[in-house]
Image (tube, helix red, strand yellow):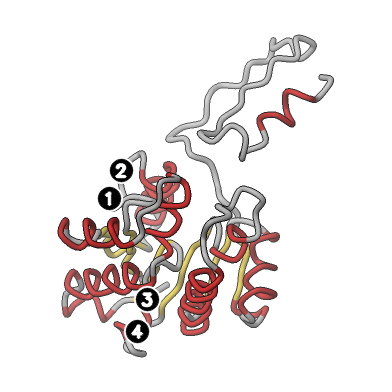
Amino acid sequence: MRQFVGVVGSGNIGFDPFDPQCWSGSSRRFFLECQRRGLLRRAFGVDVSRPAKAWFALKNFSRERRQWRTQFYSDTGYRRCLTERIRGQLSGDDYGFNLLQLGAMYDCPSIVKGRAACFSYNDGNFATSSQSPFFPAGVSKKRIDATLRYEREVNARLDLVFTMSEYLRRSFINNYGISAEKVVSIGAGINLDRLPEIDTEKDYSVGNVLFIGVDFERKGGNEVLAKDI
């Protein structure tokens, strides 16, 4: 099987593919497993320069922090700038291998231009996030439409789109018009370097729940508390 070059970037998910915090830990485990299987040629990450980051931060400023963050990372100018940073990091040898990008915040197909296959691996997309009740109300329709158009164009140029769930797979098909044959749900795996030993004496009658999620409300924490366990 042909090896690939992995690409990750932006302050939104991280810019070190092997950092335990990058992409909530999924990037490190994913690339290490691909490396173990001999699939990974190399992986690298990028972010825009500090002056560019300051410019996009000022351009998208909002007093409401969630809206500011959303406008910053959905800015298509910021995403094009990320793409150019990726272009600068690719060596001549890299074009002899496929490329796999995490998400659709950058446009690797526009760099490669058919010299290699380009894939993406996704835990979400802008279409689903913009439809969420937690999406900031102050983000303009013009911005939403521009970002959706950007992601639609990137996804249309990708050779394959991998997703972490069937629900997300359906979104790429229905919201972006990607043919069903190009979108494959491969799951998410686990974010552990090793599986813990099974506790054969665990008492399941206690009803304790370990909730893992930074954003308690958005990740369904209140619904868990409301359950009569």
Task: State if disc 3 and disc 4 touch (CB < 8 Å).
Answer: yes
Mark sitting earlier along the chain (2/3):
2
Q: Are marks 3 and 1 in contact (CB under 8 Å)?
A: no
Q: Amino acid at mark 1?
A: Asp
Query: Disc 4 versus disc 3: distance between alpha carbons?
Result: 6 Å
- In the rendering, which numbered label is found on residue 99? none
Does label 3 or label 1 sit earlier along the sequence? 1
Side (left or right) of 121 relative to 183: left
Q: Quadrant of residue 53?
A: bottom left
Nearer mark to the viewer, of 2 and 3: 3
Q: Quadrant of the N terminus?
A: bottom left
- Residue beneath the point at 80% across and 25% down: 227
Residue ID for mark 4: 110
The residue labelled by disc 3 is: 107
Instruction: Report the Cα–Cα distance between label 1 and label 2.
Output: 5 Å
Q: Nearer the viewer, mark 3 or mark 1?
A: 3
Give the residue displayed 15% in from the left and 59% down from the top.
51
Residue receiving disc 1: 16
Which numbered disc, 4 or 2, marks the residue that appears first in the sequence?
Answer: 2
Q: Secondary structure at mark 1?
A: loop
Name the amino acid, label 3. Asp
* Relative image position of residue 205 (x, y in whole percent): 80, 11
Q: CA distance from mark 4 to mark 1?
A: 22 Å
Q: Quadrant of residue 128?
A: bottom right
Element marked by disc 4: helix
Q: Residues within 10 Å of mark 2 (few under 14, many from 20)?
A: some
The quarter of the rendered structure image containing the C terminus is top right
At a point 61% along the width and 26% down the height, the residue shown is 211
Q: Where does label 2 land, which residue?
A: 19
Going from the N terminus, do you reach mark 4 or mark 1 first? 1
Q: Residue furthest right?
A: 228
Give the SS element for disc 3: loop
